[in-house]
Amino acid sequence: MFRIRTMNKISAQGLDLFPRDRYEVASDLPHPDAILARSADMHGIEIPDTVKAIARAGAGYNNIPVGLCSDRGIVVFNTPGGNANAVKELVIAALLLSSRNVFGGVSWAASVAGRADEVPDLVEKEKSRFEGPEIRGKTLGVVGLGAIGVMVANDAVALGMDVTGYDPYISVDAAWNLSRMVGRADTLESLLAKSDYVTIHIPLGDATKGFFNAEKFRLMKKSARIINLARGGLVNEADIIAALESERLAMYITDFPTAELLACKKAVCIPHLGASTPEAEDNCAAMAVRQLVDFLESGTIKNSVNFPRCHLEQRAPFRLLVANRNIPNMVGQITTILAGEGINIMDLINHHRDDYAYNIIDTEQAIPPDILERIIAVDGIIRVRAIQGAAS
């Protein structure tokens, strides 16, 4: 029986995918095999030694201590693409709102609600204050062509925009899904220089924190509008406010309000609604649950943020799963121990990602506990797990 501890309210459509005959799911379970969370801050909390995996029902994972988990061999999953349509729809809305001064017009209209018969004449008199350009025929620069960026680019093409994308690390799957009408920018600088609108869809990390700053803004048109529904930290806040107030940029729409941005008249702050749809919550929960089940029952890793993707179709009765540091001769040491005990390896796969590696080793014989202890004692091995496969 696998034990799953939840740390947030998780969609029932996701939780129902746990096979009830093999899984116990609750928010207060001791000694869980895995943790399923959404936005709960896990930094500073004690993660039990029994935890083998943490699944984040969402794309962002800055609420999880990934480095600590990696050092302990805990596989951290996220659900990229599960909320992609929800975010894409809000980006399209933000495109329109950044051009047409709908917010300003609605606020003004509310302010004259008590003037009764004067309202129609006031509307005709004041409406020109809130006019703005159409997006059709304008140039949209999409920075980051992952699941969300591709969907935004394709829909913007359908809306009649001239779309250019920039992503030096675009995946094969994303490239297949991208409309052939989307142009490719050779450099970020060239994209920024020609875009009327820029929408940001890259992850936040040490290399991208404050990536969009005064230097980048100086390359852009003075009429340009920036949309950031990815992560607030991607944009240098002081620089964007200065650019807006000096009319270096026309508008900034973000899903990550701060007091300073709320005080800026040319910034529109949405209260982090990008993935706030019931459909997105259901999709992300379902993805997270499937990934946990696959990992716990077969060792398969998909959509991990700290360990490599790894899958091996299981035909052998027994399976050994090993997480280790990515250093030479790890596989050789493991296989030497198994061979010395007469344990026949039927199939094996080893993948690595940055400083860590992961092995799936299928065997004809069960691996005794003392052999597992010898493997875990090898310098560089982080975690070892033996499971019995469907072929047994």
Image (cartoon, rainbow, N blue to C red):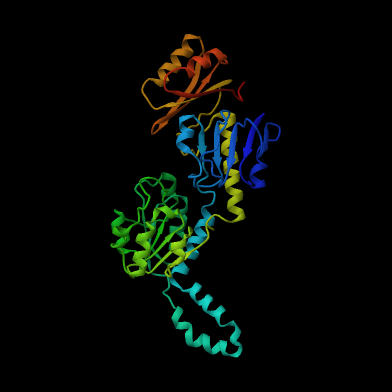
18 or 105: which is nearer to us? 105
Query: Quarter of the image containing the N terminus?
Result: top right
Residue 159 can be seen, yes or no:
no
Query: Quarter of the image containing the C terminus?
Result: top right
369 or 347: which is nearer to us? 369
Residue 48 can be seen, yes or no:
yes
Q: Position of residue 119 (x, y in %)?
A: 57, 87
Q: Residue furthest right?
A: 21
Q: Is residue 28 left or right of residue 314?
A: right
Vertical comparison of 289 with 322: above or below: below
Q: Position of residue 36 (x, y in %)?
A: 59, 40
Instruction: Name the image quarter holding residue 388.
Output: top right
262 or 299: which is nearer to us? 262
Q: Residue at x 60, y 84 (%)?
A: 114
Vertical comparison of 61 with 246: above or below: above
Vertical comparison of 72 with 210: above or below: above
How many marks can you see?
0
Q: Position of residue 113 (x, y in %)?
A: 59, 82
Q: Residue at x 51, y 56 (%)?
A: 87
Q: Residue at x 57, y 90 (%)?
A: 118
